[in-house]
């Protein structure tokens, strides 16, 4: 299971008092789950399940917003996609954006070979590690 810690400031909580501590988890169910700590019950409660990956989610990172209204969560999956989840406020829905690997810069050492492996990857997906390594990347 992957997890990332995150906190929302009291000013961005709106009417959700007592739920300042949050973290994101991910795993073999292809979901990213947002958990909030409830002071009244002294327990962690699943607040949301974010759907967007089609295979195991192997890593999740929550960018701490420290007083800003917007939150970011990045996820990496076995489906070879990286998704950035953005939430404008505590009451707004999470919006997902896929990172496009075709816009990545190639390594200066193996320039053309890594670039060709990336170019040959399906749209919106990163190439397999094996296909990059075949070219000496």
Image (cartoon, grey):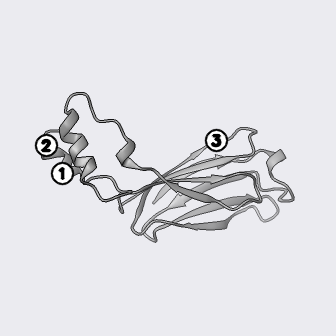
Q: Residue at x 71, y 51 (%)?
A: 88
Against 135, is 55 above or below? below
Distance of label 1 from label 3 (alpha carbons): 35 Å
Distance of label 2 from label 1 (alpha carbons): 7 Å
Tell me the SS state at disc 1.
helix
x and y percent of residue 32 in the render? 54, 63
> Dot 1 corresponds to which residue?
131
> Dot 2 corresponds to which residue?
135
Against 45, is 58 above or below? above
> Dot 3 corresponds to which residue?
64
| Most foreground residue, 81 or 4 | 81
- Disc 1 versus disc 3: nearer the observer: 1
x and y percent of residue 83 in the render? 49, 55
Q: Residue at x 50, y 61 (%)?
A: 26
Circle 2 residues within 10 Å: few <14, some 14–19, many ≥20: few
Marks 1 and 3, the one that precedes in the sequence: 3
x and y percent of residue 5 in the render? 59, 48
x and y percent of residue 62 in the render? 58, 47
Distance of label 2 from label 3 (alpha carbons): 38 Å
In the picture provided, is 18 more to the left or to the right than 48? Answer: right
| Most foreground residue, 121 or 134 | 121
Toward the bottom, the furthest residue is 29
| Most foreground residue, 1 or 9 | 9
In the picture provided, is 6 more to the left or to the right than 56? Answer: right
- Disc 2 versus disc 3: nearer the observer: 2
- Residue 81, quarter of picture: bottom left
Tell me the SS state at disc 3.
loop
């Amino acid at each position: 299971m992957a997890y990332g810690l995150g906190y929302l400031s009291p000013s961005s909580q709106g009417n959700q008092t007592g739920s300042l501590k949050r973290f994101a988890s991910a795993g073999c169910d292809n979901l990213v789950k947002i958990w909030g700590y409830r002071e009244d019950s002294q327990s962690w409660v699943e607040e949301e399940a974010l759907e967007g990956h089609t295979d195991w989610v192997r890593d999740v990172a929550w960018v701490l917003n420290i007083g800003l209204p917007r939150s970011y969560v990045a996820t990496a999956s076995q489906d070879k996609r990286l998704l950035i989840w953005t939430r404008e406020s505590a009451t707004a829905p999470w919006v997902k954006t896929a990172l496009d690997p075709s816009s990545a810069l190639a390594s200066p050492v193996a320039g053309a070979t890594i670039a060709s492996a990336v170019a040959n990857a399906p749209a919106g997906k990163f190439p397999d590690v094996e296909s990059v390594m075949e070219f000496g990347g």
